[in-house]
């Protein structure tokens, strides 16, 4: 390679890094500054709930994307969102645990359960694994109906808003009940969680762990033959996926201040999968874009009334036929670049 070629490659790399940094900066500016400013100026306070829901749903969808990354079709994320929600609700209402402590506990609980479930079922592939995970959400719902600690069909209500978070007497996050606009606080919390989730996801994908996970998707037998512990990788990826689902479910409970066995159903698990398909399975940020498009698309089509579902389904099928690699493939002519 000549000096001129090396110089050209370095310049192109620096330009790409600069453009990525500018893109990330613009995204963060839009999420944390421009969106709240627009809502305050327009008076559309309902947008806070919509965008908060989009952020949290995209967190759960990020976990589904990670299982796709290891070559497994996951249609059971709703089960872990429901588990995480109930763990947070029970700890807050029955044991007086701070909401901020229940967040990691809900995620860890879901990750631990997913390890127990994943050890046997992750041996399955394709439609067999998909069907088993599809059943998980319904099993979680029926379990919530049967267990006394979850209060059956009555659910758990009157869940307190997140309290103050302080470290060494210094208030980091104020009590949400004392805020004039808790909707803004929930939005910022959900948006921050979304940003951190996708930062972690991007780091995983671009690490040695991510490369090993990708090898499972491409040729699991070949990976095992060269010494890769495929069983451990499958369980680890599934545990991280479920951790994201538990976090999202716990925050949803704090927003609604209630949870029922029907809070997350099979349809939600299917939607998490669709968010990944629409955004693009080959792109880390695909689930985020897919969630935004599908969630807003459904709301916008409410004017169609009884034809809402028909138009929505038709548009979704058309998009998948026209853009089989997801909407983000429009931005990448080569396709598949993360």
Image (cartoon, rainbow, N blue to C red):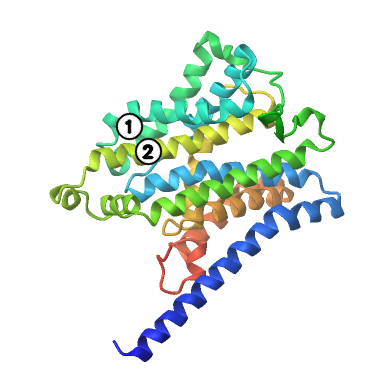
The residue pinned by badge 2 equals 238
Q: Going by the picture, which residue comes out furthest to the left?
A: 225
On the image, the x and y values in percent for residue 61 come to 50, 44
Q: Work out how far the residue at label 1 is from the one at label 2, CA to CA, in angstroms.
A: 7 Å
Q: Residue at 75% of width from left, 29% of height from top?
A: 175
Q: Which residue reaches farthest top? A: 148
Q: Is residue 255 left or right of residue 326?
A: right
Seen at 51% across and 52% down, the residue is: 199
Please say whether residue 75 is visible from this viewpoint. Answer: no
Where residue 223 appears, as percent x and y from the top left, is: 19, 51
Residue depicted at 32% across the width and 36% down the height:
235
Residue 67 lies, in percent from the top left, at 38, 44
Marks 1 and 2 in Cβ contact (< 8 Å): yes
Q: Position of residue 221 (x, y in %)?
A: 17, 49
Above or below, 193 against 338 in this view is above
Q: Residue at x 41, y 47 (%)?
A: 66
Splitting the image into 4 quarters, where does residue 172 fall?
top right
Image quadrant for the N terminus?
Answer: bottom left
- 331 relative to 74, above or below: below
Residue nearer the viewer, 76 or 231:
231
**Residue 326, visible in the rendered structure:** yes
Q: Is residue 176 left or right of residue 260?
A: right
Look at the picture and state if 248 lies above or below 297.
above
Badge 1: how crowded within 10 Å, few (<14), some, or many (20+)?
many
Along the polypeptide, which appears first: circle 1 or circle 2?
A: 1
Q: Residue furthest front?
A: 168
Q: Residues within 10 Å of mark 2 (few under 14, many from 20)?
A: many
Question: Secondary structure beneath disc 1?
Answer: helix
Quickly name the residue at label 1: 118
Kind of element beneath mark 2: helix
Q: Name above or below for residue 255 compared with residue 41.
A: above
């Amino acid at each position: 390679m000549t000096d001129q070629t090396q110089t050209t490659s370095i310049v192109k790399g620096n330009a790409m890094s600069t453009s990525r940094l500018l893109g990330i900066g613009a995204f963060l500016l839009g999420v944390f500054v421009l969106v709240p400013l627009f809502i305050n100026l327009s008076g559309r306070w309902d947008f806070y709930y919509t965008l908060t829901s989009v952020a949290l749903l995209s967190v759960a969808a990020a976990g589904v994307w990670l299982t796709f990354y290891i070559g497994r079709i996951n249609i059971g994320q709703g089960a872990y969102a429901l588990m995480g929600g109930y763990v947070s609700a029970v700890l807050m209402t029955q044991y007086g645990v701070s909401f901020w402590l229940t967040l990691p506990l809900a995620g860890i609980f879901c990750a631990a359960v997913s390890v127990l479930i994943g050890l046997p079922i992750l041996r399955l592939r394709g439609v067999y694994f998909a069907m088993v995970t599809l059943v998980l959400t319904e099993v979680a719902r029926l379990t919530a109906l049967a267990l006394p600690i979850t209060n059956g069909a009555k659910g758990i209500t009157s869940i307190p808003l997140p309290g103050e978070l302080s470290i060494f007497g210094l208030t980091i996050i104020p009590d949400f009940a004392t805020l004039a606009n808790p909707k803004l606080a929930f939005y910022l919390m959900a948006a921050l969680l979304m940003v951190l989730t996708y930062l972690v996801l991007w780091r995983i994908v671009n690490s040695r762990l991510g490369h090993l996970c990708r090898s499972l998707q491409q040729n699991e037998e070949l990976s095992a033959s060269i010494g890769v512990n495929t069983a451990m990788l499958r369980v680890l990826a599934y545990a991280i996926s479920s951790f994201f689902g538990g976090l999202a479910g716990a925050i949803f409970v704090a927003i609604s201040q209630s949870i029922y066995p029907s809070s997350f159903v099979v349809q939600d698990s299917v939607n998490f999968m669709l968010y990944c398909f629409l955004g693009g399975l080959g792109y880390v940020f695909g689930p985020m874009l897919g969630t935004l498009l599908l969630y807003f698309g459904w709301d916008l089509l409410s004017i169609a009334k009884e034809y809402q579902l028909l138009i929505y389904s038709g548009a979704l099928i058309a998009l998948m036929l026209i853009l089989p690699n997801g909407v983000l493939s429009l931005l990448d002519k080569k396709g598949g670049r993360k």
